[in-house]
Amino acid sequence: MQDYSLDAYWMPFTANRQFKSAPRMLVSAQGMYFKDDAGRQILDGSAGLWCVNAGHTRTPIVEAVQRQVAELDYAPPFQMAHPKAFEAAERLAEMAPAGLSKVFFVNSGSEAADTALKMAVAYHRVRGDAARVKLIGRERGYHGVNFGGISVGGIAGNRKHFPVGLPAVDHLRHTHDLARNAFSRGEPEYGAEWADELENRILTLHDPSTIAAVIVEPMAGSTGVLIPPKGYLKRLREICDRHGILLIFDEVITGFGRLGADWAANRFDVLPDILTCAKGLTNGTVPMGAVLVKPDIHDAFMAAAGERAIEFPHGYTYSAHPLACAAAVATLKLYQDEGLFERAARLSPHFEEKAHALRAAPYVKDVRNLGLVAGIELESRPGAPGQRGFDAFLKCWEKGVLLRFTGDILAVSPPLIIDEAQIDTLFGTMAEALREIA
């Protein structure tokens, strides 16, 4: 008998009425599996919410957090600090793409995105280039749910209820090209030219000297796993360089091994000026995010402010929280000790084969993949977009597999500790589910 009601909690990004009529309750987790309130093992095919890259309740992380909460539960981050914050920043900077050596801590990917946008606009201002205030996002982009993030983001469902956003924003076309790139394995062949829209349309419409930054996910995750076409990100980098525009990579999903490399920036050999991360930073154990920055951006703030002035008036009560820092240090060490990024690269070919075997399953109109992430796009039911994806999600849950869905796209992104047999189970269950739904 449960000793709580389902009434008070207003759940995020959830069909609350549907959930509360048939709850899906997770009560414990270990390794690759959740356990539900009926005692069933649930294979985690989504790394929680793209974040549990090292698997659940890993002992080194658990023990690090336990030690920290017993020693220092909280320390104010404004005008004060604690040693674990500097250790976490140093460890993250060591792992970061070469050239991103300054770390600003936040508490989520949403906060990281808004911080990066503020940082970009303020950077130009402190350099005396205050006309650069415009921000360029991309259609189908996801940069969290704060007003800055949804302004530069491009998922219609996340924006339509909140029609008040940042005023100086425009959007590039998304890169999804189903007609030319359906069932691509890895990076699609076609679509690098979509980056040219930045120069041919956006910069023609907006004076380049008014644009502060372009923000993109290297791989768009929450919209349904859109893999960047070959050469696309390099072209964006070149155009931004020509016009003095900062390039921001949102690596909240793609960081920490998801694409079979430590970072998408390294996977695609494109260095942004600013990089945001979260999720896998603490393996989902304690909320935390970070903004990684080139030193010249940081140094511009230091040079512009007076000796005792606050150089960047921004931050959060829980920035560099001691528990989060302890979790981050332990998580980054675990990734290295177990070679989990290299493991993801080794497993990627088997993952790809099993993902693309779903091409033969009912309703599948595209499969796309990179590293240990895949998107399976389904044909929509006439007049009921998104319902087939929801039903596939529910059917997989019934069969003991948790995955993500967005509309009629199923997203698979398991912890990096998954093995080949579990990959087989994951995609085999999806095939069964698709055969059983209408």
Image: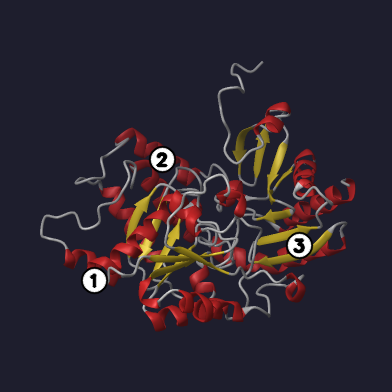
- The circle drawn on residue 355 is 3
Give the mark, 3 or 1, whose residue is nearer the N terminus: 1
Q: CA distance from mark 1 to mark 2?
A: 40 Å
Nearer the observer: mark 3 or 2; the answer is 3
> Quarter holding the N terminus?
top right
Q: CA distance from mark 3 to mark 1?
A: 48 Å
Q: Is residue 66 visible?
A: yes
Nearer the observer: mark 1 or 2; the answer is 1
- Identify the amino acid type marked 1: Arg
Q: Is residue 209 left or right of residue 229?
A: left
Give the mark, 3 or 2, whose residue is nearer the N terminus: 2
Q: What residue do we see at 29% from left, 37% from top?
A: 72
- Identify the amino acid type marked 2: Val
Location of residue 18 in the rendering, given as x and y in whole percent from the top left corner: 71, 32
Q: Is residue 324 left or right of residue 305?
A: right
Q: CA distance from mark 3 to mark 2?
A: 36 Å
Between 242 and 319, the residue placed more toward the observer is 242
Q: On the image, numbered disc 2 is attached to which residue? A: 65
Q: Is residue 103 left or right of residue 109?
A: left
